[in-house]
């Protein structure tokens, strides 16, 4: 059954070729799935049963408070949004949410984990927020209200069927 499914996978891929190849479906990505967001930001997963991860434009970090035992301040670095639950793209901005918390991180980090993210590739901006209120206040400052959220699975299904997503430059 799996072999049969694999044989038909290329026939599901869209035939549209975009001017910017970043937005094209690439059969050689299999079994890793690739969901283009805004060049160079993409979401990926290792296969149909894996969670989606959204690569961050720039790394973010959280500083651990300096304690008396520590001589050097430690940081926790984010290079991606792990276990992406929903995202939206509007006016050149990528907004994302994940409830994921790295259970291996220090207790302070687990309590202060970023869950809400905004990236604006055209301005080289990457921001993380602990709460939805902080996130909403920030997106209002850049002129965005009520993002049109979608799950990465839904967006990927549309991408496979049509080769287009609303924010792709040549899919208007």
Image (cartoon, rainbow, N blue to C red):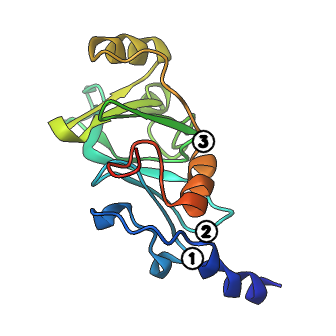
Residue 93 location in percent, x, y?
Answer: 32, 33
State yes or no: discs 1 and 2 in contact (Cβ < 8 Å): yes
Determine whether, in the image, residue 145 is placed left or right of residue 150. Answer: left
Q: Residue at x 53, y 44 (%)?
A: 84
Q: Quadrant of the N terminus?
A: bottom right
Distance from label 3 to label 1 (Cα)? Answer: 20 Å
Q: Residue at x 27, y 62 (%)?
A: 20
Q: Is residue 47 above or below residue 37?
A: below
Residue at the disc numbered 3: 151
Residue at the disc numbered 2: 47
Residue 110 location in percent, x, y?
Answer: 49, 32
- Graded by Cα atoms within 10 Å as few (under 14), some (14 to 19) or many (20 or more), the crowding at tag 2 reads few
Residue 47, image quadrant: bottom right
- Graded by Cα atoms within 10 Å as few (under 14), some (14 to 19) or many (20 or more), the crowding at tag 3 reads some
Residue 4, image quadrant: bottom right
Residue 73, image quadrant: top left
Residue 77 location in percent, x, y?
Answer: 31, 44
Disc on the earlier residue, 2 or 3: 2
Q: Secondary structure at mark 3?
A: loop
Q: Quadrant of the C terminus?
A: top left
Disc on the earlier residue, 3 or 1: 1
Residue at the disc numbered 1: 31
State yes or no: discs 3 and 1 in contact (Cβ < 8 Å): no
Q: Secondary structure at mark 1?
A: loop
State yes or no: discs 2 and 3 in contact (Cβ < 8 Å): no
In this view, the mark in front (2 or 3): 3
Q: Secondary structure at mark 2?
A: loop
Determine whether, in the image, residue 166 is placed left or right of residue 74. Answer: right
Furthest residue in direction front, as rendered: 172
Disc on the earlier residue, 1 or 2: 1
In this orientation, which residue lies closer to the viewer: 104 or 30? 30
Q: Residue at x 48, y 54 (%)?
A: 164
């Amino acid at each position: 059954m799996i072999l049969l499914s694999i044989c038909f996978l290329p026939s599901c891929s869209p035939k549209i070729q975009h001017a910017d190849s970043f937005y094209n479906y690439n059969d050689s990505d299999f079994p890793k799935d690739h969901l283009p967001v805004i060049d160079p930001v993409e979401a990926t997963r290792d296969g149909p049963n894996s969670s989606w991860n959204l690569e961050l434009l720039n790394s973010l970090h959280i500083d651990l408070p300096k304690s008396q035992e520590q001589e050097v301040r430690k940081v926790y670095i984010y290079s991606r949004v792990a276990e992406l639950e929903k995202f939206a793209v509007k006016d050149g901005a990528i907004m994302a949410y994940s409830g994921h918390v790295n259970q291996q991180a220090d207790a302070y980090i687990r309590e202060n984990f970023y869950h809400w993210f905004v990236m604006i590739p055209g301005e080289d901006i990457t921001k993380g927020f602990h709460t939805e209120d902080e996130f909403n206040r920030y997106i209002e400052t850049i002129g965005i209200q009520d993002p049109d959220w979608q799950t990465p699975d839904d967006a990927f299904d549309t991408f496979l069927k049509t080769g287009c997503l609303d924010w792709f430059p040549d899919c208007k």
